[in-house]
Amino acid sequence: MSEDSLDLAALLDPVDLAQFFAAHWELQPLHVQGRDAHYYDRVLTIGDLENMIASPNARYPAIQLSKNGAYFPPEVYSEDIKLGDVCFSGVADVHKIAAEYRAGATIVMPALHQSWKPLTNLCTSIEHQLDHVVHANAYLTPGNASGFAPHYDTHEVLVLQIAGRKRWRVYEPPIAMPHRRQPFTPVGHTLPAAPVLEVDLAPGDLLYLPRGYIHTTYTSDTHSPHVTLGIAVYTWLNLAGELLQSGMESIRFRKALPQALPAAQSCARV
């Protein structure tokens, strides 16, 4: 690893990779703490985020707003601008974004690995090591706010706390290791009385959540930016599905199963 880059081992340090995969991967959460507040400066800083949001090139869906568990319609904070015969759609209005942010909305920058080189390098590094697809989203939440309602993800989650503080409450999964076709549905779901983990993430901290663990967050009286790395695992179920599809190309697997013999005839041959 070069001095200006991070990889999975550096994200988990001082927990070594063998310990992580034996005790935590797909099993239970992990909180890494006590590191330098600028540990993730090589990946993203609050200044980097602010510059992206204020950029005249910021456009929906690369920038979004969320509050109380729901995303805002893009027309609330963006507009379509015509220049001659050309239309630039979803151009962000930084003044409207700032107003909604001050009112408690979280600024979301999804798929940031596609446009921010340090996150591109980090996600690529983890992909090469795990052979699973990795994406990166950034979230900037104001003080005394919660951007999303309790939910679980259908991918593994690594949370990188960039600045500020954020309290995470984590609850037992209602379904172990849910498939991407088993997304969280809040209807009829009641949170357990107590979380299995409640931590305050400080700058430089990391939180790992296996898919299925329900979580919710709250900020302190200051703003809180963090990056979420989502690891979309390739499962045995995915492999079985691809094998089933590829089997259609083989005449051997398109043949009917052997027909059942009549009972009398079957007994006669024994």
Image (cartoon, rainbow, N blue to C red):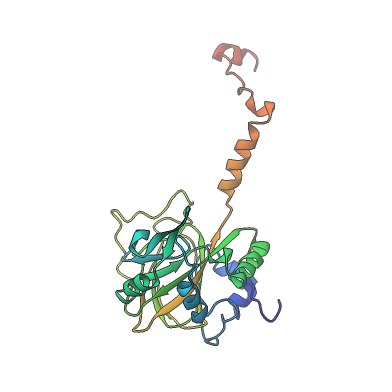
Q: Residue at x 58, y 41 (%)?
A: 241
Across and down, in percent, residue 116 comes to 58, 69
Decide: is 268 above or below 174: above
Q: Is residue 118 visible?
A: yes
In this orientation, which residue lies closer to the viewer: 232 or 68?
68
Q: Quadrant of the N terminus?
A: bottom right
Q: Is residue 95 left or right of residue 1?
A: left
Q: Position of residue 188 (x, y in %)?
A: 28, 54
Q: Residue furthest right?
A: 2
Asked if residue 235 lies left or right of residue 2, the reply is left
Q: Is residue 200 left or right of residue 233?
A: left
Going 29% across and 53% down the picture, which residue do you hit? 187
Count every numbered label the image shows and give the total: 0
Instruction: Tell me if residue 80 comes above or below residue 167 in the rendering.
Output: above
One can see residue 213 in this view? no
**Nearest to the observer: residue 53 or residue 191:** 53
Q: Indicate the quadrant containing the C terminus: top left, top right, bottom left or bottom right.
A: top right
When asked about the image quadrant of residue 153, the answer is bottom left
Q: Quadrant of residue 264?
A: top right
Horizontal and vertical percent position of residue 64: 41, 64
Q: Position of residue 126 (x, y in %)?
A: 63, 66
